């Protein structure tokens, strides 16, 4: 396999020569500085392109006694190139290194890339390190050796060694997908993690697999695919992070064998889903879900307390004062408001108390949904519309729903899906 070496070049030639002799690259890119614009002093590129003896064997020498680095290492003219950058402008160095690495990868596909950051200024080393960390196809190395102090290694003891960076690179690569969780963007996290090559270290590889699979689990949950979410979370049940352990029984409740309890749990799940859409600024989506929540709540109460199906109601079950329409099959049906009218006349529980007190408020609250583009209107729902509706839901609707679901064993509102992933 073709090996490409990238080196930062500073005032000392020894680490560069050592790196080339140890790696034995097929091609070398030297990251160098040009003549200093302020002082006019030559840059480190002289060590690569200088003629004759242009390098001092030791800093104490009066005159140069060695040829340039390509000559010392036997590199032919077509085996190296130079990338010029500034000595202490980290932004510029980082950008130059990123561009240089991208061009090298394009020029030498399917090659092995090694970036040696030993030479050059501290800013040059930092710039190359940051650029290399962005890519999984580049190994980082430095030239080191035995030391008697913190100034330099002993001459003659130098050797090239790979830098241990896999955890740093891994954390850097997954950072955007941790951030995606904070926005409930689990699908985005899963898609991004699929594009990352799994780390070679076993422990990191396990963490990567867990992060990717749990991102998928919560993405499926967010898309109402509760069974898939259950299966994925159960796979990790013994090793779930502490902060995520409580979610497994919650999602399992969404697949409960008892239909009344399962639907009750799904009502709260829909409410939290709506809040996630609002947190993303998708207020039309949020209010559309709330409309369905209010309608489904009425259907749930009527089904399990009265045995009534709002899609097909017997004429004998329609109380005086409630007017229902028939569909094409001559079946009486009840939409959202009509269903709540049935609750008012057919039940005596918390839902009946709620609709008697909040009937006008309910009509006012669903106006914003009816005016939405996703319903019958032409204007997007604004944040203040959602905030007003959310306040009413929290103060009136959710307490009523909890009072009703208490009868099937659900006494508290479940926690919102997680916004942080900790391994």
Image (tube, rainbow, N blue to C red):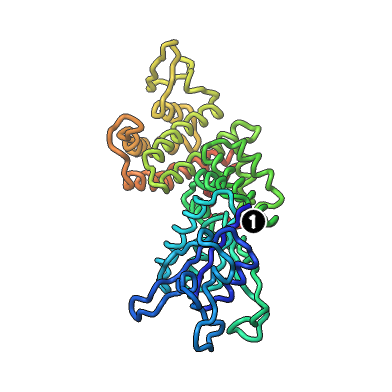
Residue nearest the observer in this picture, 40 or 102: 40
Q: Position of residue 261 (x, y in %)?
A: 60, 36
What residue is shown at x 52% (from left), y 23% (from top)? Answer: 308
391 left or right of 157?
left
Q: Position of residue 332 (x, y in %)?
A: 44, 16
Residue lying at 34% horizontally and 46% vertically, measured from the top left: 388
The correct choice, above or below, for 24 with respect to 317 in the image is below
Q: Residue furthest right?
A: 238
Which residue in the rendered view is the most extreme toward the front? 52
Is residue 26 shown above or below 161? above
Residue lying at the far left in this picture: please name it.
378
Task: Describe residue 216's horizontal placement relative to residue 46 as left or right.
Answer: right
Residue 55 higher or lower than 392, as above or below: below
Task: Please give the count of numbered marks on the rendered protein.
Answer: 1
Instruction: Give the residue displayed 56% in from the left and 84% down from the top.
Output: 58
Residue 335 position in % (x across, y down): 41, 25
Assign the C terminus to one quadrant of the image.
bottom right
Residue nearer the viewer, 100 or 406: 100
- From this view, report whether residue 221 is shown above or below residue 161: above
**In this picture, residue 115 sits left or right of residue 249:** left
Whether residue 170 is visible to the viewer of this picture, yes or no, is no
- Crowding around mark 1 (Cα neighbors within 10 Å: few <14, some 14 to 19, many 20+) is few
In percent of width and height, residue 200 lies at: 67, 55
The residue at which mark 1 appears reads as: 242
Residue placed most toward the observer, 357 or 309: 309
Q: Quadrant of residue 320?
A: top left
Q: Residue at x 28, y 37 (%)?
A: 379
């Amino acid at each position: 396999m073709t090996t490409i070496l990238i080196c930062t070049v500073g005032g000392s030639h020894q680490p560069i020569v050592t790196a080339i002799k140890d790696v034995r690259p097929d091609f070398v890119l030297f990251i160098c500085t040009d003549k200093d614009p302020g002082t006019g002093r030559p840059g480190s590129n002289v060590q690569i392109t200088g003629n004759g003896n242009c390098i001092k064997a030791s800093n104490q020498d009066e005159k140069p006694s060695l040829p340039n680095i390509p000559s010392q290492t036997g590199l032919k003219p077509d085996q190296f190139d130079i990338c010029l950058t500034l000595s202490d402008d980290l932004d510029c160095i980082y950008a130059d290194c990123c561009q240089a690495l991208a061009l090298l990868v394009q020029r030498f596909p399917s090659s092995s890339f090694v970036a040696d950051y030993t030479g050059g200024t501290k800013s040059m080393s930092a710039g190359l390190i940051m650029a290399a960390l962005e890519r999984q196809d580049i190994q980082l190395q430095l030239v080191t050796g035995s030391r008697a102090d913190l100034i330099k290694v002993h001459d003659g003891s130098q050797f090239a060694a790979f830098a241990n960076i896999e955890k740093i690179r891994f954390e850097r690569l997954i950072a955007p997908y941790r951030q995606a969780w904070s926005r409930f963007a689990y699908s985005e996290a899963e898609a991004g993690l699929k594009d990352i090559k799994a780390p070679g270290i076993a422990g990191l590889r396990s963490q990567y697999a867990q992060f990717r699979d749990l991102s998928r689990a919560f993405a499926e949950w967010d898309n109402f695919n509760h069974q898939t979410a259950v299966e994925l979370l159960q796979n990790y049940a013994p090793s779930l992070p502490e902060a995520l352990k409580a979610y497994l029984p919650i999602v399992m409740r969404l697949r409960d064998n008892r239909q009344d309890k399962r639907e009750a749990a799904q009502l709260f799940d829909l409410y939290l889903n709506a809040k996630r859409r609002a947190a993303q600024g998708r207020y039309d989506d949020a209010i559309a879900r709330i409309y369905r929540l209010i309608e489904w709540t009425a259907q749930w109460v009527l089904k399990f307390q009265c045995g009534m199906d709002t899609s097909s109601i017997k004429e004998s079950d329609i109380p005086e004062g409630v007017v229902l329409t028939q569909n094409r099959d001559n079946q009486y049906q009840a939409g959202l408001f009509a269903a709540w009218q049935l609750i008012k006349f057919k039940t005596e529980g918390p839902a009946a108390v709620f609709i008697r007190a909040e009937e006008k408020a309910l009509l006012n609250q669903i106006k914003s949904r009816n005016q939405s583009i996703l319903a019958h209107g032409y204007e997007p729902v604004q944040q203040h519309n959602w905030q007003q509706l959310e306040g009413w839901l929290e103060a009136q609707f959710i307490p009523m729903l909890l009072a009703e679901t208490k009868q099937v064993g659900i006494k508290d509102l479940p926690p919102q899906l997680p916004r942080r992933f900790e391994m």
